[in-house]
Amino acid sequence: MAADSKSDIQMTLAQVAARLSAESPFNIVFDRGDDISVELYAPVGTDKQQPHERDELYIIASGHGTFSRGKDLVTFEAGDLLYVPAYVPHRFESFSEDFKTWVIFYGPKRERPAV
């Protein structure tokens, strides 16, 4: 993101969502290496995520549905915050057509836990 414009201060949901497509259901808003990365995610039909190397937060921007994390299943709606530790299997199991979520990855990449 350019540091010489207003875009490093504020991004609206509509601005970022306009960059999404079925082929690319996520858009990175900004990335600060191992500190923090923020993206908007709006899967179409199926969530195909795999576990990640960093802890993450989801802030539901619009829509509703169900979310699984490990063996837990919860319902969610706009405004909810969901937390997922690194390497824990998770996905949005079902979601409305207007579903969009901010994704915040933070902290350094972690080593995969021994099984």
Image (cartoon, rainbow, N blue to C red):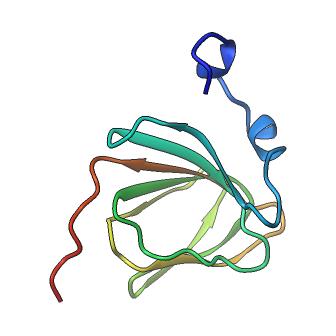
**Position in image of residue 66 (x %, y %):** 61, 76
Residue 99 sits in which quadrant?
Answer: bottom right
User: Does residue 15 appear to the left or right of 58 in the view shown?
Assistant: right
* Point 73% across, 32% down: residue: 12
**Position in image of residue 42 (x %, y %):** 72, 60
| Along the viewing direction, whichever of 30 and 95 lies nearer the viewer | 30
Rendered view: 84 above or below 115: above
* Point 35% across, 76% down: residue: 88
Q: Quadrant of the N terminus?
A: top right
**Position in image of residue 22 (x %, y %):** 82, 66
Q: Please state the total of marks drawn on the protein image.
A: 0
* Residue lying furthest left: 114
Residue 113 sits in which quadrant?
Answer: bottom left
Rendered view: 94 above or below 115: above
* Residue lying furthest top: 4
* Point 33% across, 38% down: residue: 35
Q: Quadrant of the C terminus?
A: bottom left
* Point 33% across, 73% down: residue: 87
Rendered view: 17 above or below 85: above
**Position in image of residue 33 (x %, y %):** 38, 40
Residue 110 appears in the rendering: yes
User: Does residue 113 appear to the left or right of 74 in the view shown?
Assistant: left
Residue 68 appears in the rendering: no
